[in-house]
Image (cartoon, rainbow, N blue to C red):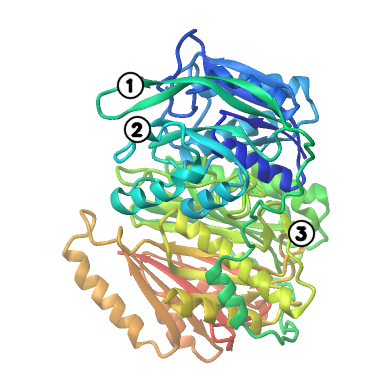
């Protein structure tokens, strides 16, 4: 991929270029934003480093590609975490700059950005990239700062401190290299929690040489500029270019690429069984009865389940035209329901998208995409499974009523990195119900984040690594939204993947994380996106944020205790987790458990997700017709976390 690099001159923007080159991308241009007013060294920008901007033009000759520059005329007008186009905002200056680059270099497809922890910075670059049809390349995103700084120091990067603005740093540190400052910064981090990479604005750097520089910069004169009396100051300097005799492009051996699996997930991999066999479906027949659409409104949520298009009434094969008509009809139904409750598509938190044939996914996704905004679209789970004849697609969703403590939050990463896959469709990696600190987690498959290629699963060993990699992605998403505890997790597999692999991966993962194994449901489906063989998704929560608060009153306690007692009395395999005002129960049933199933399905103010093969779930159709909110997900087989097969699983979400 040909890319343009956003280059401030700092260590992060330069080191990210190194990783872009290492990943096989081709650098064709540099881009920089600078103060509009002559003689101004630094702006009060929430986004761009401008100290040292007067030497940035040298980088074009040092690196050997053209430099494009744009004045910063806007301000940090829109300070929302998730950015939307705003007139007179400095991000619109970035848009103008990258648009000019794209005009001059129409084959540019990527934008290098050195964001490490700043969601504010990442979302803004991704917003501009989305508007221009570009991909953000952010290989430093979510890296551990201490590890990252050590890698930068070892890479041959000549980056020096040019501004300080933190306790423990002063004018005497200006001009020092990051190699000299590394130990100092780690000591300040331990003592004062100073960010090792300067992510809190503690310092800024300028790069004078890098492995991809054909010429280097050398300081000819310098002096310190005092900004305030509390040791905030920066270095003003002049430079000259110096030839690097005998320069050849390096082979990047000194540039460290983080391993695909983190240390803890590598430990999981080494403990997982390697010898696995195939699992064949005993179900898989499409069913001939229709699961009715269901709608449940609670104090905080709206559950809309089992929407199917009107043309699904015909028992005939579904072609692309019928698929397009069905998904359009589904969204028409959805729009009607949302309007009835004063809601819109932006209020949707999560969706389950079931398709009968993944070959029709492109048509389905085109229509689906048109209904959701670029800013925090819902988290999504999408699988191919056993829908009834004539039905090409089924949609269910969870919607949140807006409220004082219900502002939409989550993570929607659209750029390439080493962290986790960017979204490959119009969905967020996670959306958080801020009232109860519950995260709806999008399905994660084993994509290699840096390239978005599917991890090889052709052998038992690579199959196990794929399952662990996809689970690591889910874990990284949980961490970034601070909802680390599992609430209800579903692992979708295909008939080429052994249950023994998932069972072993989950068991070792629970040992490492000290988690709750009983929240896992393993289900067999016919196909997964990108021909993957495993997909993890579900719900997680933040137990710290979920202590009883203003929304919890004493009248709820007796109801909650009675509900817990009833669930505890069930003899089936089950796990119940309470978080905020919500109880989530994961239960497994078999034919013969009808009385207990009836008791569970009679719970008030509850939403039910039922997984099971159609011929087994058929016994529940009369019960399900009477339930106010039930989503049916037809699958081949169902297993619990220990690999024990059951006729069906029910995940119950009850609001108190």
Q: Position of residue 162 (x, y in %)?
A: 46, 29
Tell me the distance, in whole angstroms, between the alpha carbons under discs 2 and 3. 54 Å
The residue sitting at 46% across, 36% down in the picture is 176
Residue 358: mark: 3
Crowdedness near tag 2: few (<14), some (14–19) or many (≥20) residues, C-alpha within 10 Å: many
As rendered, which of 605 and 370 lies closer to the eye? 370
Q: CA distance from mark 1 to mark 2?
A: 9 Å
Q: Dot 3: within a 10 Å radius of its alpha carbon, few (fewer than 14), some, or many (20 or more) residues?
A: many
- Residue 134 pos. (x, y %): 69, 34
State which quarter of the image contains the C terminus: bottom left
Q: Is residue 563 left or right of residue 628?
A: left
Q: Is residue 43 above or below residue 574?
A: above
The residue to which callout 2 is attached is 165
- Residue at left 48%, top 16%? 74
Residue with the mark numbered 1: 227
Q: Secondary structure at mark 2?
A: loop
Q: Image point 53% across, 51% down: which residue?
A: 148
Locate residue 623, reporting x and y percent.
Answer: 50, 75
Percent x, y of residue 242: 68, 26
Q: Is residue 508 visible?
A: yes
First along the sequence among labels 1 and 2: 2
């Amino acid at each position: 991929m040909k890319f343009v690099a956003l280059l401030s001159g700092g260590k992060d923007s330069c080191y990210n270029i190194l990783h872009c080159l290492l990943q096989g991308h081709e650098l064709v241009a540099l881009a920089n934003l600078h103060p509009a007013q002559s003689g101004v060294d630094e702006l009060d920008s929430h986004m761009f480093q401008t100290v040292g901007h007067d030497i940035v033009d040298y980088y074009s000759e040092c690196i050997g590609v053209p430099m494009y520059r744009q004045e910063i005329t806007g301000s940090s007008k829109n300070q929302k975490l998730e950015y939307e186009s705003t007139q007179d905002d400095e991000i619109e200056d970035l848009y103008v700059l990258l648009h000019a680059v794209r005009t001059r270099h129409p084959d540019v497809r990527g934008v290098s950005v050195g964001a490490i922890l700043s969601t504010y910075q990442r979302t803004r670059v991704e917003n501009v990239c989305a508007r221009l049809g570009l991909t953000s390349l952010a290989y430093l995103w979510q890296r551990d700062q201490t590890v990252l700084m050590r890698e930068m120091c070892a890479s041959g990067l000549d980056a020096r401190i040019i501004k300080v603005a933190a306790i423990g740093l002063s004018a005497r540190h200006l001009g020092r290299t990051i190699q000299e400052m590394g130990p100092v910064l780690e000591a300040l981090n331990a003592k004062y929690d100073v960010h090792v990479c300067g992510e809190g604005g503690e310092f800024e750097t300028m790069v004078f040489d890098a492995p991809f520089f054909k010429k280097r910069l050398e300081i000819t004169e310098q002096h310190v500029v005092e900004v305030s009396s509390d040791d905030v100051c920066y270095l003003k300097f002049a430079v000259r270019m110096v030839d690097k005799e005998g320069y050849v492009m390096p082979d990047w051996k000194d540039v460290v690429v983080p391993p695909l699996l983190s240390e803890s997930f590598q430990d999981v991999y080494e403990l997982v069984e390697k010898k696995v066999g195939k699992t064949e479906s005993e179900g898989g027949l499409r069913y001939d009865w229709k699961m009715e659409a269901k709608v449940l409104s609670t104090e905080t949520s709206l559950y809309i389940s089992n929407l199917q298009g009107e043309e699904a009434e015909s028992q005939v094969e579904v072609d692309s035209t019928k698929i397009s008509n069905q998904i359009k009809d589904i969204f028409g139904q959805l729009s009607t329901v949302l309007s009835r409750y004063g809601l819109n598509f932006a209020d949707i938190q999560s969706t389950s998208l079931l398709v009968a044939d993944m070959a029709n996914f492109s048509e389905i996704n085109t229509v689906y995409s048109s209904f959701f905004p670029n800013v925090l679209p819902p988290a999504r789970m999408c699988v191919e499974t056993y829908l009834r004849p004539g039905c090409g697609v089924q949609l269910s969703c969870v919607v949140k009523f807006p409220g004082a403590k219900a502002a939409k939050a989550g993570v929607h990463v659209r750029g390439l990195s080493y962290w986790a896959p960017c979204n490959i469709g119009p969905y967020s990696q996670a959306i958080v119900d801020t009232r109860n600190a519950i995260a709806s987690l999008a399905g994660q498959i084993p994509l290699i984040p840096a390239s978005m290629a599917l991890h090889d699963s052709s052998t038992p060993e690579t199959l196990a690594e794929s399952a662990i990699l996809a689970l690591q992605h889910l874990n990284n998403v949980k961490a970034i939204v601070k909802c680390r505890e599992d609430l209800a997790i579903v692992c979708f597999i295909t008939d080429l993947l052994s249950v023994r692999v998932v069972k072993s991966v989950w068991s070792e993962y629970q040992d490492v994380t000290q988690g709750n194994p009983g929240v896992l449901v393993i289900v067999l489906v016919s196909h997964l996106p990108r021909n993957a063989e495993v997909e993890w998704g579900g719900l997680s929560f933040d137990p710290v944020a979920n202590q009883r608060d203003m929304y919890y009153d004493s009248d709820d306690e007796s109801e909650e205790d009675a509900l817990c007692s009833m669930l505890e009395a069930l003899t089936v395999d089950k796990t119940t987790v309470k978080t905020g005002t919500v109880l989530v129960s994961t239960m497994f049933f078999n034919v013969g458990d009808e009385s207990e199933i009836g008791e569970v399905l009679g719970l008030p103010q509850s939403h039910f997700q039922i997984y099971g093969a159609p011929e087994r779930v058929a016994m529940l159709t009369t019960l399900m017709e009477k339930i106010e909110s039930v989503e049916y997900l037809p699958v081949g087989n169902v297993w619990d976390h220990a690999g024990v097969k059951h006729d069906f699983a029910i995940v119950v979400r009850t609001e108190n």
